[in-house]
Image (cartoon, rainbow, N blue to C red):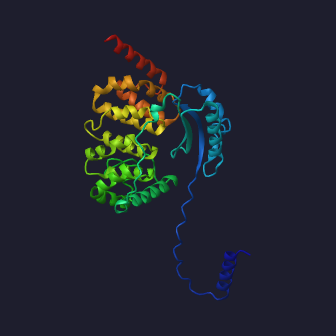
Amino acid sequence: MNRTLCAALLALSSACAAPRPVAPPAPSAAAPAPAPSYVYRYEGIEVFGTRQPKAQILECFTGLPPVGTDVDMAKGEFIQALQAGKARLQERFAPAFVRTSVTTYAEGKTLAVTVDLVDKGDEWRLAYAPEPTGSVEDPAGLLAAWSAYQTRMWELVNAGALSTQDTACPRAFHCFYGATDPRLMPLEDRFVEQVPLHFAELVQVLRTDKSQEKRATAAYLLAYGRSREETVQALLPSMNDAGEAPRNAAMRVLWQAQQGADRVLLPVEPVLRALHGPMISDRNKAGALLKALVEKDPSLRGRVLRDAGDVLLEMAGQRQRIDREAALQALRALAGRDLGPDAAAWRAWVQAEAGRSMGSR
């Protein structure tokens, strides 16, 4: 018999045999939070950045489940199918670079895949600074503290206890989610107090440490610097970091720092270069940065439209939200109006603007 059930029956028997006053029950322990679910609805796979026929590339991924299937990412089948498709793609097309990027969305519990490619002959898109080789001590334990903060934040997000729409950011130039949540604010206090004191040490981590994870963490922490200008200048060189994680972190902080500024804080050239980067995390941050820059300085519109128009249009035609929405926001800023979500309407506008520019020469 179940041991707990036995104990319960014995307790009932003794209560019947010798009734006596019953003490108030002890408060029961709170029920444990439900384990986070890693089941997502699969929205499909797309290709970006190649001149090869996209339909032929997608044929390499026929092992993926049908669109609309619920996929448990805690299991390995989906990733294994992606890896097999990537191997077939490399064997058939031999690109200079390929990455299958999986993006999950907490709101709606969906996921989508982007196959990012760089064709042979376009290796300039892969040119970044050399990887650093140093090793820097964790300044005042701030890197470890950030890791603990992120772990707690994602626990709350994955459990449905924190919304990814909660992006208020009163104490830094960049935040993820729930910065004003009382469960997270005590953890953030340390960054507010100590990052300004250890700013130079964090910059050293960002510039010289061989660990991409440590460089990315340092980039996020620098958002707690004393001024936007100081933070932007510290992060600008990392737009050329060879590592995806530190490059993405730096651009994410730069985007939010620029978005909240009243003037342009960084040059447009590295942002245009980033738009042509090899990965979705490069171009979607660059698209958001272009929007922020053009809104602060409308004189940039002609240059941005000439150098970035084709890439923004390709992004706007994607189903992947983090591609499409970043491009549409940049295009709205360039046009000064909203032509809606239809990529064809934006293509017609870009072509008309290009014709107008040629006619004025």
Residue drawn at the location 35% of the way across and 13% of the way down? 358
Q: Quadrant of the N terminus?
A: bottom right
Quarter-of-image position of residue 282: top left
Quarter-of-image position of residue 251: top left
Q: Quadrant of the C terminus?
A: top left
**Image: 154 above or below 244:** below
Q: Nearer the viewer, residue 146 or 153?
A: 146
Which residue is at the far top? 359
Asked whether, in this view, residue 84 is left or right of residue 319, the answer is: right
Residue 257 rendering spot, x and y as whole percentages: 32, 43
- Can you see residue 228? yes
Quarter-of-image position of residue 269: top left
Q: Nearer the viewer, residue 163 or 59?
A: 59
Residue 178 rendering spot, x and y as whole percentages: 40, 52
Q: Nearer the viewer, residue 307 or 43?
A: 307
- Can you see residue 171? no
Residue 63 rendering spot, x and y as whole percentages: 68, 38
Residue drawn at the location 48% of the way across and 52% of the way down? 157
Residue drawn at the location 32% of the way across and 25% of the way down? 301
Residue 115 rendering spot, x and y as whole percentages: 56, 35
**Image: 23 above or below 212:** below
Asked whether, in this view, residue 199 is left or right of residue 247, the answer is: left
Q: Nearer the viewer, residue 239 or 242?
A: 242
Asked whether, in this view, residue 344 is left or right of residue 233, the answer is: right
Asked whether, in this view, residue 66 is left or right of residue 324, the answer is: right
Which residue is at the far bottom? 18
**Image: 144 above or below 8:** above
